[in-house]
Amino acid sequence: MGQHEYEYLTEASIKLLDQITGIDHRSMFNCLYEFEGSFDTGFTLLSVQDILIKRRYVYAIRLEEHPDYERFKAQLEAIRTKGFEHILRNPSSEWELQSNPAIAYWNGTHLCCEAGSQLWERLVLEGRLTGADVCLAKTRFSCIFNNFAPHSFNHYFPGQNSHLA
């Protein structure tokens, strides 16, 4: 069972940050998703996907633009009828965290990847993304809260974050 309060916090924060100009949205979103990843949460990109695409945290491309489309054409075409599907590095093999992780997702109309993901890296290396799109997020949650003692989470949220102590 996911910890929905962290999912809701991330979604609400992204909606709020979207209203602010003059900030590095990609880095802020990266911090939020890194924070959310510390907890038992589900896949939350879809509910704020339009904002994430607008702010260049997520890239939506046509299925045919997958760098290995010709190699995995049959497997990739099979997802067209699905509403959502994770795309593995090798779509013809089973998921495995280290050797065959999810590198993107199908949202029902587009192949989507996050800035910094393996698919994003391929798009950058192949020159399909340029300019500001090739820059990674500058700030990470762990850096911002580097000196924040994990036990202090328990002070504010007793019993809910014992894994951080």
Image: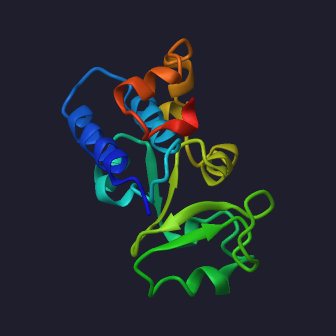
Q: On the rendered structure, is 154 left or right of 162? A: left
Picture coordinates of residue 60, whole percent (x, y): 44, 58
Q: Quadrant of residue 73?
A: bottom right
Residue sticking out furthest to the right: 99
Q: Quadrant of the N terminus?
A: bottom left
Residue at the image position 37 percent from the left and 33 percent from the top: 157
**Of the pair 105 and 142, the residue shown nearer to us:** 142
Seen at 66% across and 73% down, the residue is 69
Q: Outermost residue toward the top?
A: 147
Q: Is residue 134 visible?
A: no
Q: Position of residue 26 (x, y in %)?
A: 43, 34
Colour scheme in the image?
Answer: rainbow
Residue 108, picture quadrant: bottom left
Determine whether 85 is above or below 60 in the image.
below
- Using residue 165 as the reference point, say whether residue 13 is left or right of it: left
Q: Position of residue 10 (x, y in %)?
A: 34, 42
Give me the residue at 44% from left, 43% from top. Answer: 57
Question: Does residue 65 sit above or below 25 in this rendering?
Answer: below
